[in-house]
Image: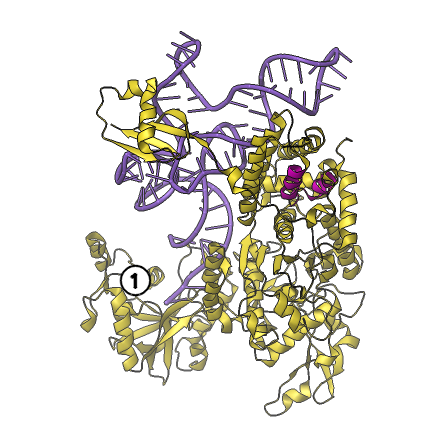
Amino acid sequence: MIKYNPKKIEQKWQAKWANSGVFNAKTGSKKKKYYLLVEFPYPSGDGLHVGHCRSFTAFDIIARKKRMQGFNVLYPMGWDAFGLPTENYAIKKGVHPSVVTKKNTDNFRRQMKSLGLSFDWSREINTTDPKYYKWTQWIFIQLFKEGLAYKAKININWCPSCKIGLANEEVVAGKCERCGTAVEKREKEQWVIKITQYADRLIKDLDLVDYLEKIKIQQKEWIGQSFGVQVKFLAERVEDFIEVFTTRIDTIFSGTFLILAPGHNFIDKHKNKIENIGEILKYREDAKNVSDMDRANEDKDVTGVQLKGITVKNPATGEEMPVWTSDFVLEQYGTGAVFADAHDKRDFKMAKKYGIPLRTSIKPDNETLAQKTKNLEECYEGDGTLYNSSQFDGLKSVEARQKIALWLRAKGLAENKISYKLRDWIFSRQHYWGEPIPMIFCEKCARLPGGQGWQPVPERDLPIELPNVKKYKPTNTGESPLSVISKWVNTKCPKCKGPAKRETDTMPNWAGSNWYFLRYTDPKNNRSLSDEKALKYWMNVDWYNGGMEHTTLHLLYSRFVYKFLWDIKAIPKTIGPEPYQKRTSHGMILGEGGIKMSKSKGNVVNPDSVVKQYGADTLRIYEMFVGPFDQTIPWDAKGVVGVRRFIEKIYKLSFSKIAPVKSDENLKKLLHKTIKKVTEDIELMKFNTSISALMQFVNGWHALEAGLNKKDLSDFLKILSPFAPHLSEELWQTVKIKGLCCSQKWPKFNEELIEKKRVLLIVQINGKLRDKIEVRVGISQKEAEKLILKSEKINNLVNNVKIKKIVFVPDKLINIVT
RNA sequence: GCCGCGGUGGUGUAAUGGUAGCCACGAGAGAUUUAAAAUCUCUUGUUCGAAAGGACGUGUGGGUUCGAGUCCCACCCGCGGCACCA
């Protein structure tokens, strides 16, 4: 036996795996397919994070086990390589982003290979490869053709530091998700994608898939579906009406005023009828300058201005109501207008401040609260019993909502409506390192009656490649850096062949990841995004793992884009409306002491150094052993040492404690128990307890004089191999069975060996542990009772006490109740 | 504020309503060694006790049950998500 040398062993087996092609998935194979997917990383200059290793290793374990169980496994990897950090780094160093990307992906690939991850490298993809983004652009054109991509002048979230427009999802608490700078509003022409058209299906179809419940909940909440009523408030003095969306139509009788969002177009439409229009427009301007963060601040005072000269009629009471404008009413949600009453905190606050009359119509069940509500001392927002509501008095809120809606509908003043928080997806970015948006603007065509200025690039001209230029710094004006490259910008109109200009904005970094899982099924196809047969064979993704942070971004976007492609039959109908059958999520790995790993804190653990010091098998097992897969967990350098000890122990035992003929009886039993536990736990992602079971087995082996025969050792190596693949291959040579360990058949456990003959029966008195006795399996209650009464200890305790009853759990426990 | 998840030894954690603390780290003692590292053996929830053994113990308070870390109710704390959404 030579000393355990992971460096030598691991490189040797990595080379053998690569040469043998054992991890390559075969499209069309007769075996049952299994498509395992982990989110492809953004290849940053920092290299692989130990967090990547966690999810990649976990799925590698599943992939290896599934292969051994006879599945044709697709476990692919690629690079989501467009994006800002690469561009920024390239600008700083004066190198082209493609050079930086090449360097980073090479490094990531090397690191992944050094971990022994069983990816099918023949299917590697890269979103920055023109052969790949040809199809990203193709998808954009299809969205445009179907009317789901449109250009609009809108207020966008502008990050003054990144010099880029952000999608709503990329703004966190009013700050840029990436750099933390407060986001400004800017009005810009942007490409926008109508994801809202799919809002209901994105919710409904969650019923078809097996996602972690919290993922479903988060997506549903983000989409924010609410069922309500859209009510018409007829305006007096002007011939018009204002529509209001509400989920609380039961409170309509208490509505005493109406509030518009500052940007509401009713104001623009009736400029000359609003007596204080100057004041109103000034308020609108001021509101624009209040950041989202300040406006959302709870402590902030409400502000507002009344539209003088304008009133509307309450559709329920017929009363005249004043109209106000206030910045707490959002232009983008519902109709941008609300009716206000004493049953909403903000309305309540505003009415109190400006002395607007208030009325209540909902009585809470609690009497004191009811009094306070009635006296306008407190604002009650919940459901209750109606009063002040004419024929609806005495109804409960739930019923009243139905009846009032029906009544108003009959009068033609209301209709049922579903509202969503989800907004259309802003798809333009003002940067160089992204997919060019394949659109051309022709002024001549735009001027034609009913003319369409924007033309998609003809599909035969795809891909529109990024021009290879020296200058690609973002501009302060918000123009894309591509806009200054006149040679590239000026082109011909695909329709009239006259002079025209290319779109200079690029796509967001979500564009390439929207559909990458489809490309893996046929990564080199030049005629379509993937061959129909390949899609039919491999799709859907059976199991997809990724970060919780992508729940309302990538995961939602890609579901949407998939549904769209499915609708236009770019994907065979037979596959179904959802791309991913199952979705799980890994927990973060924090630095030691439980703080987030960051360069500035200097607590980043580099997988390379762990591999160098302890070996890949140690790193793999450590990351799986440290705690439950879905839990956030701090790194512990000491724990790594413990795992290395475990590995060395296996290595030693495999040479020193081999039985020539028969394995030790008890050890063999323990082995089969372990096979059962590991087989079941991997499926449940309980990697930590699988490893604990493997450790228990090894400890049992270690404690014995002699141990396993080669046949049983081979079974042990098989179940160890998904966790420590290199070590298993190395030791596989000692059992002298042909082939690679990773290509063996997964062992079956022998139920007979696991079954116990004798068990420890727990003896309790009133639920408290008093004794344990060893009995044969299957003894009856009577026999057990007899046995325990023989015990002096129990006898003493039970003597002279009246026994009320005896609870008996076969082969487990007997409880005497006195 | 709303939604979700969690709270167990010195630490990471384990426990189909049935022995709380498996496995690992750390710590202590011993063996080996000139010595140290490594390795091996034993101990290790708290507490009373010389021991046998007992009492207490899974964030807090209540409840259901023969029996609760696990189920129910209320609360406290931590983490994550959303947040003027009408």
> Taking A136 as reference, is A378 left or right?
left
Residue A21 at x, y percent in the picture: 75, 55
Residue B71 at x, y percent in the picture: 35, 45
Q: Quadrant of residue A473?
A: bottom right
Residue A770 at x, y percent in the picture: 35, 24
The quadrant of the rendering that contains the N terminus of chain A is top right
Q: Is residue A172 visible?
A: yes
Q: Quadrant of residue A406?
A: bottom left
Instruction: State the residue at coordinates (63%, 39%).
Output: A622
> Taking A160 as reference, is A211 left or right?
left
Q: Chain of mark 1?
A: A
The quadrant of the rendering that contains the C terminus of chain A is top left
Instruction: State the residue at coordinates (81%, 65%).
Output: A470
Q: Secondary structure at mark 1?
A: loop
Q: Which chain is yellow?
A: A
Look at the picture and state if A8 lies above or below A409. above
Q: Residues within 10 Å of mark 1 (few under 14, many from 20)?
A: many
Question: Of residues A352 and A763, which is closer to you in this image?
Answer: A763
Look at the picture and state if A42 lies above or below B25. below
> Taking A765 as reference, is A392 left or right?
left
Q: Is residue A712 magenta?
A: yes
Residue situated furthest bottom in the rendering: A449
> Taking A184 as reference, is A220 left or right?
left
Residue placed under numbered mark 1 in the picture = A343
The stretch in magenta equals: A711-732
